[in-house]
Amino acid sequence: MNDFPEDPLLGAELDTLAVRAGQIRTHEGEHSEAIFTTSSYVFASAAEAAARFSGDQPGNVYSRYTNPTVRTFQDRMAALEGAEAAVATSSGMAAILSTCMALLKSGDHVVCSRSVFGTTTVLFTKYMKKFGVETTFVAPGDYAAWQAAIQDNTRMLFLETPSNPLCEVVDLPRLAEIAHAKECLLVVDNCFCTPALQQPLALGADIVVHSATKFLDGQGRCIGGVVCGREAEMDEVLGFLRSTGPTMSPFNAWVFLKGLETLRLRMDAHSASALELATWLNEQEDVETVFYAGLPTHNGHELARKQQRAFGGVLSFRVKGDKAAAWRFIDATRVVSVTANLGDTKTTIVHPGSTTHSRLSDKEKSEAGITDNLIRLAVGLESVRDLKADLQRGINAL
Ligand SMILES: *Cc1c(COP(=O)(O)O)cnc(C)c1O
């Protein structure tokens, strides 16, 4: 919320905001942000306590809903996403849950991309449904399907772009138009790009959610999330946190602040290495197809060039062969980590069909392109030469 004329960061670029936005300094003069590990706050008098509780006087009351370190992280994220406000949560799932609980009610309907994080699907199909919110899933790039799925009671459209793991790119201004024509909120999970590569609010989205666990931290240390958007809606989200408690800890907020300071440099490095590896994999005899929007042959390439600064760190590819061949590839690597996490300095490799997307039926997998010979790579910050040598071990094992 850096919209005051006297703010020296007014009009500052992303690199500056990532390092400095939201910082407060105590009388100790600390250069790096302080961690306020306190659950509650003292008041100068009984009258001040009463004014804080009633909201007549701004200020901290209790760290379930406000904490200076968490606020610094929130203000920095709002600045980076170009949002009026942000609310930090205990995890990425808590960010999505809090958004839904604050802004939807029983009887509402959601249209969701079928290519979203697996647990997000479970949140909608199992838990939101239990409280009377129905969800229809559509292919992310099928605009007619989005339009057709909207009902009179639809309140929210939800998606990730680029999608996981096939890097399908969705035209956000076009989808925003579809959403707003029917007075629906467009909610974008911007986990894969981060604001360093894509700012969905500037492209027409109403709300951005993040798993801070991934690239925002970037070093695989903490679980957290954040919701960014208009002040009025973020007040509702904060109200939900205040009454239910999925709050970010000040320690995690501090770790994420340190992560944000290198965000743009890391995202550029992840993107450059992923592009080099995607290009190299694409040249290999034993690799059938590579999915990465940075490749000119990818069907989302032109669109990604328009709405992203770079193509990000996640790619996937189909090897020639069956599931056993894909597993042999994965098992032959020695440097990269076999894990489903992403957005880490350490490169990770996973077989989506039997892990992240194993909940899908065979029909759903085939519709979503999750074949048995598909492998996902989330490229870290190791040397590309060493990563190629490691992936060559996989190719040799096919
Ligand atoms: C990991 C992830 C989430 C969930 O975040 P957590 O911090 O693990 O709760 C949501 N969306 C995407 C795209 C993710 O990758």
Image (tube, helix red, strand yellow):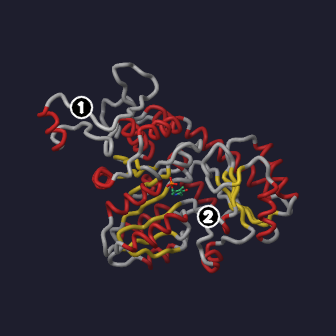
What residue is drawn where x is 31% and y is 72%?
106
Residue 364 is drawn in which quadrant?
Answer: bottom right
**Residue furthest left as drawn:** 47
The answer to whether residue 261 is seen in the rendering is: yes
Foreground residue, 332 or 284?
A: 332
Question: Could you tell me the amino acid type at mark 2?
Answer: Thr
Q: Please tell me whether mark 1 sits on a helix, a strand or a loop.
A: loop
Q: Please tell me whether mark 2 sits on a helix, a strand or a loop.
A: loop
In the rendered image, residue 8, in percent from the top left (x then y), is placed at: 37, 29
Question: Could you tell me the amino acid type at mark 1?
Answer: Val
Residue 319 placement, left or right of 204? right
In the rendered image, residue 260, in percent from the top left (x then y), is placed at: 51, 39
Foreground residue, 74 or 18?
A: 74
Q: How would you rate the neighbour count of disc 1 (Cα within 10 Å): few for under 14, some for 14-19, many for 20 or more? A: few
What residue is drawn where x is 51% and y is 35%?
258
**Residue furthest front as drawn:** 39
Q: Quadrant of the N terminus?
A: top left
CB atoms at circles 1 and 2 under 8 Å apart? no
Q: Quadrant of the C terminus?
A: bottom right
Foreground residue, 119 or 266?
A: 119
**In 3D space, how far apart are the residues under numbered discs 1 and 2 (Cα atoms)?**
46 Å
Q: Which mark identifies residue 356?
A: 2
Residue bearing mark 1: 42
- In the depicted structure, whether residue 136 falls above or below residue 116: below
- In the depicted structure, whether residue 15 falls above or below residue 300: above
Badge 1 or badge 2: first in the primary sequence? 1
In the rendered image, residue 348, in percent from the top left (x then y), is placed at: 68, 52
Foreground residue, 63 or 265?
A: 63
